[in-house]
Amino acid sequence: MKAWRIGLGVTMAVLGILYLLPFVLVGLNAFKPRKAIIRNPLALPDAWNVENFLQAMEKMRFVESLMNSLIITAASVALIVFFSAMAAYVLVRRPTRLKQFIFYALVASMLIPFQALMIPLVKVYGSLGLLNSRLSLIYMYVGFGAPLAVFIYHGMIKAIPLELEEAAMMDGATRRQVFFRIVWPLLRPTTLSIVILDVLWIWNDFLLPSLVLPDSARTLPLATYNFFGTYTVNYGPLMAGLVLTMLPVLLVYMFLQRYIISGVMQGSIK
């Protein structure tokens, strides 16, 4: 048993190092000039120079791209969570054949890869003049993210005792009050899990914004593409740009780590 624990610990340590190695390399190379990166990407920088970060912020239009990413991510996640929770509640508490069909259709839609819808999506929405705006991108994110969120909320709401809602309605609460005052607080662990998944997906997404957004409203992942030339890549500012792109999510996680972990633990216990 002791040897098994030691082997498991060594395996987890090796996997942890392999997982963190790309992030460490990106962080180290962000402070090195292009020649030093090409010569030895594993070496420490000779001098911790922030010139790459200054170039990256200027070429990426960092503040503007950051605001675009924040607006799109926050609005999309908020709408996904809000409407998916209400839709799942109606599907669970007021079951009909039509609503069962809607639920199964939502679940089935998760099996369709985005690449299969990519070209028809651009053609249809382009012909309707609904591309080249942040609102269109937010609308699409809600459509692609809602099925998974409804599926997760659906299972969680089914586990909530119906007697809690019946007792509240006997005390005079309306259906809306029951949802927002009884059901919604109980969904907090599930909501945190969905928020984590959707924030990471939307913040790091490259393909859908590249199809929808114009050059004047690019997100941070799209802005890093400016460092790729026709025949060359400016590796130093590119690495710095990747660090700047990852930094906001890391800071949010550091400040909300306690709430995220507690929410996930509560959800696993339930």
Image: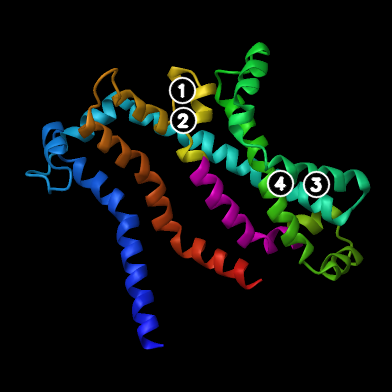
* Marks 1 and 4, how far apart at CA: 27 Å
Q: Is residue 181 visible?
A: no
Q: Earlier in the sequence, mark 3 or mark 1?
A: 3
Q: Residue at x 20, y 46 (%)?
A: 28
* Badge 1 element: helix
Look at the image and tell me in which quarter the N terminus lies. bottom left
Pointer 4: what residue? 84
Amino acid at circle 1: Ala
| Residue segment shown in magenta | 182-201
Q: Residue at x 62, y 36 (%)?
A: 113
Compare residues 226 and 82 and report the one nearer the observer: 226
* Marks 3 and 1, how far apart at CA: 35 Å
* Marks 3 and 4, how far apart at CA: 11 Å
Q: Which mark is residue 68?
A: 2
Q: Is residue 170 visible?
A: yes
Q: Main secondary structure of the magenta part?
A: helix
Residue 57 in the image, given as x and y percentages of width and height: 28, 30
Does the CB distance between marks 1 and 2 fall below 8 Å?
Answer: yes
* Badge 2 element: helix
- Packing grade of label 1 (10 A; few <14, some 14-19, many >=20) is some
Residue 51 in the image, given as x and y percentages of width and height: 16, 33
Residue 11 in the image, given as x and y percentages of width and height: 35, 69
187 inside magenta stretch: yes
Pointer 3: what residue? 103
| Quarter of the view holding residue 64 | top left
Residue 182 sits above or below residue 71 on the image: below
Amino acid at circle 2: Asn
Q: Which mark is residue 217?
A: 1
